[in-house]
Structures are given as C-alpha cells and as structure tokens.
Image: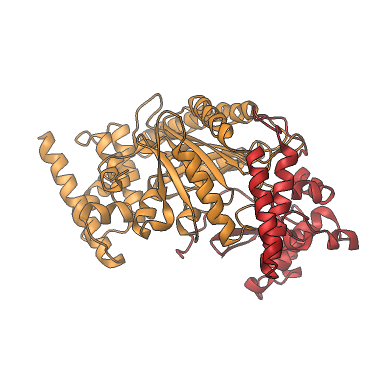
Amino acid sequence: MNLDIMTQQSGEWLRGGGTDGDIVISSRIRLARNLSSFPFANRASAHQKAEIEHFLRDRLAKFDFLPKLHYLNLANLIPLDRQLLVERQMISRELANADGPRGVAITDTETISVMVNEEDHLRLQVLRSGFSLDECWQEIDRLDDAVEQKVNYAFSEEFGYLTACPTNVGTGMRASVMLHLPALVLKKEIEKVFRALQKINLAVRGLYGEGSRASGDFYQISNQVTLGKSETAILAEIRNVIPNIITYERQAREALTRESRQHLHDKIFRAKGTLGNATMMTSEETMDLLSSVRLGVHMNIIDDIDIAAVNELFIHTQPAHLQKLIGQALDGEERNSARARYLRARLRDIGTQLN
Amino acid sequence: MQPVIETEFRVKQCQNCSQPATVHVTNIVNGQKRELHLCQECSEKQEILKNQELNLSVILQTMIGQHVGAPTDELARLTCPACGIKYMEFKAEGRLGCPRDYQVFQKALEPLLLRIHRSTRHVGKIPPHASRNATVQAELMELRHKLREAVEVEAYEQAARLRDLIRQKEGQG
C-alpha cells in the first residue's frame, strides 16, 4: 500500500454525498477485541507484544476476506506517515504515538481498518461516508466473524467481549456519527444539544475522537454504554437521535438567514477572502474558516466553489497531508506559510476552472 | 508527545459525588489519556490542584475505591494467577491485565461496571466459535506466565519444558 498515493484522494470520511450529506459527514463503528490467551497490551512484556503482533499479522496476511486488507507495520513507519493515517481516521492518535510492535491492516477503499496492539489487541473499525450505521454494522459484523475464525477471542458469557478497560467491556462497540454543525455553533445552541445527548448517555467528541477539539465544527456523537445492551439497541439509540440534531442544525441555518443575514454573509465571505489571501495559516484557523466556507456553499451563499473541493481542502491542509503534498518535512512556522501558499493556489485554480 | 487540547462540551458530573464537575484534569501517561472530573469540594479534598501529577494515582484509587468500597485485606491481596496483576495495581492504573481478571476481580468489578454501564451482564453478540476451547486458552495463559517467571529466575530447563508444553497446547487451540 502506497501512502503517498493515498494523499491524492480525499479519503472515505470526507467523500461527502448521501442524504443530508451537508450535515452528516460519516459513520463509524469500532469493536474492541482481545486474544484469549495473552495478557492485555498494557500488561504484556515487550516480547509478548512482539508475539501478539506477529501472530495477528500472520493471521491477517492469510485472511480470506474481501475487500482485501493490507498490513502496515507501524513501528517501521516514520512519524509523518503515522500522522497521515491519523488524519485519514485509519488509526488512533494513541496507536500512532505508542511504542513497540504494532500495526494496522487497511483496505484500499479506507473503509476498514484493523489496529493491532492498541489498548486492546485488536480494534476493528468500519468507516463510511454519510449516515450509514446499519451498513457499517453489517460490514463489521462480517469482519468480526471472519477474524474470529482465525483467532480465539477473550469472551465470557457474563461480561461479553473482555477488554483492557472496563468502560469497553460487553459489546466492545463504539459507534459514532460525525456531524458538521456550524450554524448551531454560531447560534451558541450547541451546548444545549450536548446536554440533551448526555441525558440519554451519548457522548460528544471532536474530530479525532477522545480528548480532541471540535475543530472545523465537526462533532462525533457516540455511545458510552457497552454492557447490558445489544449492538442493535445501541445503534438504534444513536440512529434515532441524529435526525433531531439534523433538524436543529437546519433550523439554526434558517434562523441565521432570517435574523442575521448580513452578518452571516460577511462571516462567510471574510472566511473565503482570508483563505485565498493570507500568507500564514495555522491548521486550526484553516479548519474554522473552511467550516464557514462549507456552510456558505451548502446555503448557496457561495456559488463558485465546488463542495468536493472544500472537503478536499479540509484534509489536504492537515499537517501530515500538507507535508506529503509538498514533498518535504516542515516545522510549524514553515508549515503555516506553506499551508497559506497551498490554499491561495488551490482557491485560485478553483476560481479559474469555473470562470 | 503532542499536547492535547481539551474541549469537553458536556456538563460533566463529579466522579465522586455527582455534583457538577468544575475541575477537569487530563494527564497523558505513556501515551494513555487519563481524565478526571471532580467538583471543587472533592478536588480540594484530594488536593489535585496543589499537586496534580503526583496525586493522579491517589485520585484514581479514590475513584475506584468509591465504587467498590474500602479495600479489604482480601481484595488488597488479590493477584491474578494468569497475568500476575494485583488488584491494587488495577486500582492505580484503571486497566486490567488479562481476560482472567474479570473472573478473579469479579466481586470488586461488578459495582464499577454497574456505575459505568448501569448493568453487569452482557446481552449482545456471542462469537459464533466461542468457548470451543476456553479451558485450553486459560491453561495457555497460565503456562505463559510461568514461563516468564522461569526466564526471570534463569530456570532455563524448566522454561524449555514450559515452552514445549505451550507449543503442544497451541496445537490444540
């Protein structure tokens, strides 16, 4: 698998499209699984971790599963490549920054990833663009069964799938839907939504999962409970609440048009202007400005930028992607200047193509 | 290690007493993130504001202790025969050592699970090939632990014997 080619595409999670594709970005399910006859990764010796990695790499290599999985030995990758995989949502930041033998198997489509030696021996993940929890579940259930044909999972009838952290035990499942909610943020109504979600035991996290900031107004809604409820019941809880949040976001967009049209237009065009003219640009500022532009395109306020191009800019301006695209490692300052240069050039190209 | 920018939007409850939490602590230890959410009163009790890093394990102990009650001598002495983790180590780190721990520490874990999930029983998917050789797997884990101990004390003859036994058992699994 060639990671440099990967950079050219925008990846599954930002592919866009689908019903309510302006608000629902992607759906994801991950399953935590462990081998029954090894200590959990945090307790395993260096030797045992190597043994686990070797064992799982070997099983995954002989895996008769379609689509085909390609295994990457993360200990052998340079930090920039690992960061790239984080930005593409294929591995967790924890796995990227960890030490020791570890890996990930991914499909060409970037819809499936299997992490090895994360907090649990195996973390299976299925990621799809749009609101597609059911498709994700069907796929990951099939993947889980196929893996289980090759290895013995740590499972107990009482506690279900046994995990290193008691917060994941049972189904071992974390399902999430990523939403773009710029209008709720602008209207300062987002916290109300979070409080409502918390009451029904759903968590809200930022773009890169646990502990990450909600940059670009992207939010992940996920389940917290993994024990005492079936996978289907957990998925239904999330599935049922998403249409309500979509409605709130739509109402907030309408309210903005009605109540503060001028401010909204000003914010969106300033964002576009800054992206196309600034000479220094941090990743965070880029995300926030692109979020406004994305809102502008979807509300037909901006009509000369294609939404696919905006989605692509979100990912291409991430630190590792940017360095890959430019073809050299850059420190923070250089990166901000290179990012601004890249944005100016891209926005100019997009403008020329349309005129 | 990259700094983690923490923005939590939910109004968290204190992990000790369910009052709204006003003190939020995120620590990264060996790449593992640990979060704490406490109300002012509990945080002062635990002095985390004065000395955040040193007290992390104390706070976690308090938190887990809160769920399972004060550790009895029996609990304090509990050690998993398969992976060697002591109950006190789980209390300090918040991560279990191996699948067997769920059975070994069951009494202490159930109140914690109830608090996290409001349930202590799995009702979801059952792996289609489950428990075809659960006994062999449990034995394997114990043998591997013994092997590690043997290597540590340089009892190589015994280690070699254990290694052969493991290979033989792996064949069955």
Residue A276 vs residue A142, the one in the foreground: A142
Q: Position of residue B84 (x, y in %)?
A: 74, 59
> What residue sits 57% from the left and 26% below the top?
A240
Residue A201 vs residue A169, the one in the foreground: A169
Q: Position of residue B73 (x, y in %)?
A: 90, 63
Looking at the image, residue A228 lies above or below residue B47:
above
Residue A159 vs residue A257, the one in the foreground: A159
Q: Is residue B20 visible?
A: no
In the rendered structure, the answer to whether residue B155 lies left or right of residue B32 reads right
Q: Quadrant of the C terminus of chain A?
A: top left
Q: Quadrant of the N terminus of chain A?
A: top left
Q: Position of residue A153 (x, y in %)?
A: 64, 39
Q: Is residue B101 visible?
A: yes
> Quadrant location of residue A250?
top left
> What residue sits 27% from the left and 58% below the top?
A281
In the rendered structure, the answer to whether residue A86 lies left or right of residue B164 reads left
Residue A329 vs residue A256, the one in the foreground: A329
Colouring style? by chain
Look at the image and give the colour of chain A. orange
Looking at the image, residue B22 lies above or below residue A182:
below
**Residue occupying the far right of the picture:** B73
Q: Position of residue A85 (x, y in %)?
A: 39, 49
Numbered label tally: 0
Q: Which chain is red?
A: B
Looking at the image, residue A116 lies above or below residue A132:
below
> What residue sits 18% from the left and 51% below the top?
A344
